[in-house]
Image (cartoon, rainbow, N blue to C red):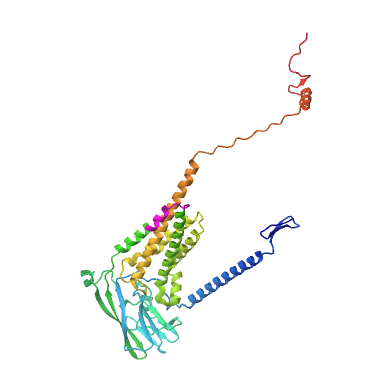
């Protein structure tokens, strides 16, 4: 059987009893080819992005990668003032909010960093970075707190035992000489915590061949910001975004509110990913991307989930409200509240001004919390309307027609003449009745 219509489709019945739908000679085949071509292109682009990401992550060496124990913020600012005597090709800077020092050696010769007892600790050679396994600093500097137990062989008087830890002449390390390690603030800071203070000048000894050098810097106390304006702005944003959930979903304003909520979800997701990238931006491209899947995994996942929820809400499916509520809750909790320390600290682990980090976190809290409130309000309104319909009067059922079949007259007379076991009739008289004589 073949059926063709005006749309260019034809249905044919195959020999095995099945049906096969084919398209006519119009633009259907070209459309199928175009769709297949677009899908193939998207697969190739996705594959190229994944391969590129893996290549960049593989190029990030352990000595230059972003640290997983970076503080969320601090009130102590560490700065490098310079290397004396100056050495062309030697560059030192502070990264990760003062948690680490970074030294890049492009001089073409070996530069040593000396440990706390003056022993060789690190060697930055043209072919990579080497650490002395006999130096106590190798173990004390592995964590920010410096609480790694020392092995039995850690002795600054022993001959150096070098182990390669990086393939590039760039190294990052925690150095206790450049940070404040005590829980209690210095005496001057405790007396006037609302004013900046110079805590101390610090020195890290270096050596290039037989020539000694010094890496010098400063450690200052900066008063923390007032968190009240930032929290107030964040909570006000939650209320403003959440009010959109009061508009009826099926109305025209409600449809516009759906588009607005989807756009806000995208903005919140981008803000979360931007903050995660900022946390690793001072580590270069490799450290930035590596930080997305290590130290900043939750902000990355919640940001991506918010983007996906916003795109799904644009389809206007009933589950879109639940997706917005869930993504907003995760965004506010796992990216906003967990990083709210930027409201309380003057130095934050981003290479940009601290105000930018506070703005990003405030946007994440406002958008995430607002999406959660709006989604819950819409879900409650939907449940209330469906419950009202279910509890209302039931619609009247249409009466069912009952059909009867009348037998023909001849058939009925034949039945009256038949003899039945249970009380049949004979000549119109029931057999169980007594006979009347007379």
Q: Residue furthest top?
A: 438
Observer able to see residue 376: yes
Q: Position of residue 390 (x, y in %)?
A: 50, 43
User: What residue range appears in magenta?
Assistant: 240-251
Q: Which quadrant: the N terminus?
A: bottom right
The relative height of residue 351 versus residue 241 in the rendered view (above or below) is below
Give yes or no for residue 241 being in the magenta stretch: yes
Q: Which quadrant: the C terminus?
A: top right
Looking at the image, residue 111 sits to the left or right of residue 425; the answer is left
**Residue closest to the eye, 88 or 175:** 88
Q: Residue furthest front?
A: 6
Q: Position of residue 345 (x, y in %)?
A: 31, 68
Give yes or no for residue 70 being in the magenta stretch: no
Counting the numbered discs, the total is 0
* Residue found 43% across the figure and 72% down from its top: 291
Q: Position of residue 60 (x, y in %)?
A: 46, 77
Observer able to see residue 153: no
The relative height of residue 82 versus residue 429 in the rendered view (above or below) is below
**Residue closest to the eye, 243 or 362:** 243
Instruction: Answer with the quarter of the image where residue 410 lies.
Output: top right
Instruction: Answer with the quarter of the image where residue 411 lies.
Output: top right
* Residue found 41% across the figure and 82% down from its top: 170
The relative height of residue 226 versus residue 426 in the rendered view (above or below) is below
**Residue closest to the eye, 134 or 354:** 354
């Amino acid at each position: 059987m073949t059926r063709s219509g005006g749309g260019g489709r034809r249905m044919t019945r195959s020999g095995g009893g099945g049906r096969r739908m084919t398209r006519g000679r119009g633009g259907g085949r070209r459309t199928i080819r175009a769709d297949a071509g677009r899908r193939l292109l998207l697969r190739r682009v996705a594959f190229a992005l994944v391969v590129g990401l893996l290549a960049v992550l593989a190029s990030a060496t352990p000595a230059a990668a972003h640290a997983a124990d970076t503080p969320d913020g601090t009130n102590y600012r560490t700065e490098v003032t310079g290397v004396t005597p100056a050495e062309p090709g030697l560059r030192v800077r502070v990264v990760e909010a003062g948690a680490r020092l970074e030294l890049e050696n492009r001089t073409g010769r070996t530069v040593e960093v000396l440990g706390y007892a003056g022993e060789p600790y690190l060697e930055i050679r043209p072919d990579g970075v080497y650490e002395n396994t006999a130096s106590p600093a190798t173990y004390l500097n592995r964590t920010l707190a410096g609480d790694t137990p020392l092995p039995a062989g850690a002795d600054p008087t022993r001959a150096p035992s070098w182990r390669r830890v990086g393939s590039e002449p760039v190294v990052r390390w925690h150095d206790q000489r450049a940070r404040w390690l005590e829980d209690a603030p210095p005496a001057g800071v405790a007396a006037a915590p609302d004013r900046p203070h110079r805590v101390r000048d610090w020195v890290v000894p270096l050596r290039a061949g037989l020539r000694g050098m010094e890496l010098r810097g400063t450690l200052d106390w900066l008063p923390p910001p007032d968190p009240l304006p930032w929290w107030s702005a964040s909570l006000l944003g939650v209320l403003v975004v959440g009010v959109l959930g009061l508009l009826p979903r099926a109305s025209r304003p409600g449809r516009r509110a759906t588009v607005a909520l989807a756009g806000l979800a995208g903005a919140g997701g981008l803000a979360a990913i931007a903050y995660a990238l900022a946390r690793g931006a001072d580590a270069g491209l490799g450290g930035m991307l590596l930080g997305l899947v290590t130290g900043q995994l939750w902000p990355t996942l919640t940001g991506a989930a918010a983007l996906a929820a916003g795109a799904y809400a644009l389809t206007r499916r009933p589950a879109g409200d639940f997706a917005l509520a869930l993504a907003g809750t995760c965004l506010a909790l796992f990216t906003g509240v967990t990083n709210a320390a930027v409201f309380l600290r003057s130095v934050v682990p981003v290479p940009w001004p601290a105000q930018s980090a506070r703005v990003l976190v405030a946007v994440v809290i406002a958008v995430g919390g607002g999406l959660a409130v709006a989604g819950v309000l819409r879900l409650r309104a939907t449940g209330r309307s469906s419950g009202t319909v279910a509890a209302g009067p039931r619609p009247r059922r249409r009466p069912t027609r009952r059909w009867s079949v009348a037998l023909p007259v001849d058939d009925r007379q034949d039945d009256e003449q038949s003899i039945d076991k249970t009380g049949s009739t004979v000549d119109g008289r029931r057999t169980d009745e007594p006979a009347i004589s007379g």
